[in-house]
Amino acid sequence: MHINKIKFDKNIIKNYDVNCPRYTSYPTAIQFINYTKKYNIKKIFLIKKNFISIYIHIPFCKNLCYYCACNKIITKNINFSDYYLTLIKKEIKIKKKYLNYTKNIKQIHIGGGTPNFLNQKQIIKLITIIKKYFKIKKNIKEFSIEIDSRNILLSYISLIKNLKFFIISIGIQDLNKNVQKDINRIQKKKEIIFIIKKLRNEKFKSLNIDLIYGLPNQTTNNFIKTIKKIIIISPDKISLFNYAHLPHKFSSQKRINIINFPSPKKKLNILKNTINLLLKAEYSYIGMDHFAKKNNKLTIAQKNNTLYRNFQGYSTNSDCYLFGFGVSAINLLENNYIQNIYSINKYKNLLKKNYIPINKIIILLKDDKIRKYIINNLMCNLKINFQNIKIKFNINFKTYFEKEINKLQIFEKDKLIIIKKNSIIINLKGRFLIRNICSIFDKYHKNIYTKITHSKSI
């Protein structure tokens, strides 16, 4: 069934155009509380799993993109990076007291900001630091970096290939000139194609491209043109994010004229047409905002019911702890989430005192773990099995979630889900509104509160 045959009436758009989390974690980041010394660091960083994943946040950008919701520092002074890398090294050394570094590193991701803000000497320095303090698996599954195609030399591409990076993510967002002007991210199509051809020539294992729908001056027709050009490029994975307009949280978004935003109905039409084009181009719709080629590991993992979701999006590394280094980086451990301090000055001052630069934390209760498991399975595998939940948590699903099942009736009536005797399945139409469906199992979710904390689901 093609998605362009699915029609959403006005009532459905009205009913489901509410604020919902993206569920890169559960509980979501707004539930994290301020860290105090009452928490036992040794217990917090207790390691049981055999593998760990590393995320390193590089916050620097040369230019300000108005839409951006990342923790970033706008500067053209690359000397900041040298000092920042010494801070990263310091954080790793401090954490070494609490972490078992004999564990194998299964995944490394460098994000931002703009990771290729680091010059060639600096990126070599960063990789040297990582290799000094971590035992990296020979057959590491993911070694990835985000790059800005506007600020990269061909020699840099060859360097990161030689450093053994094999997954590259490029933020394009939209190729339309008017949209680019409104979000202050001007990049010529020819330059992007040139860089991508160089990446292809270097034979990176995976080329990922990020796009955003819901930006100012976007129309169905002009975004279809962008999608068709992206299909010709043939990336291995496409992330199609729904723009989150939260100017009270991200001041740069105040520079965007809200009059130019597409309506919820137009946004949904953009999404429907985009999905249809990508399906015809032999991409699998992983869920919500991710598409991958049919031979991609994400597609395979979803078929095998082993797909996972974390702060980097969809992943296959559910058997890993996530350790974050750098300002605002998040750690995902056995029973807790820990977020680093946002301010680089506070980050620096805490490291000088030999403190782990923790800002916020949340310890998961049993109920949190149950709901996290359910939301993750809905987001990733598009279904939940009541018997599996009973075996894993020793609960009767229908009794434990009686209220939630009643609330799901409207979703079934609108043909977004199918509620069976022992399972709940999200159908093709429901993938559009998966955030809304998951929010039913989110005990912290209240629309009045989330209006100022989360973006619209449509």
Image: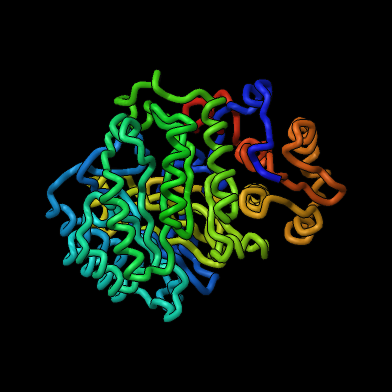
Image x and y of residue 77, in percent: 12, 49
**In the rendered picture of this protein, how many numbered marks are placed on residues?**
0
x and y percentages locating residue 87 in the rendered image: 23, 59
Q: Quadrant of residue 136?
A: bottom left
- Residue at the spot x=49%, y=52% of the render? 313
The quadrant the C terminus occupies is top right
Q: Is residue 303 above or below residue 310?
A: below
Q: Is residue 376 above or below residue 223?
A: below
On screen, residue 441 versus residue 190, left or right, reads right
Residue 262: x and y in percent read 47, 25
Closer to us: 456 or 204: 204
Residue 98 visible to an observer of this rendering: no
Q: Depth check: 246 or 260 in front?
A: 260
In the image, taking residue 214 as reference, residue 405 lies left or right, namely right
Q: Nearer the viewer, residue 429 or 164?
A: 429
Residue 70's x, y, as percent?
Answer: 35, 43
Residue 409 versus residue 133 in the image, above or below: above
Residue 273 location, quadrant: top right
Q: Residue furthest top?
A: 259
Location of residue 264 by image quarter: top right
Looking at the image, which is closer to me, 356 or 424?
Answer: 424
**Residue at (60, 36) in percent of width and height:** 444
Could one spot residue 130 in this view of the protein?
yes
Q: Residue at x 46, y 63 (%)?
A: 45
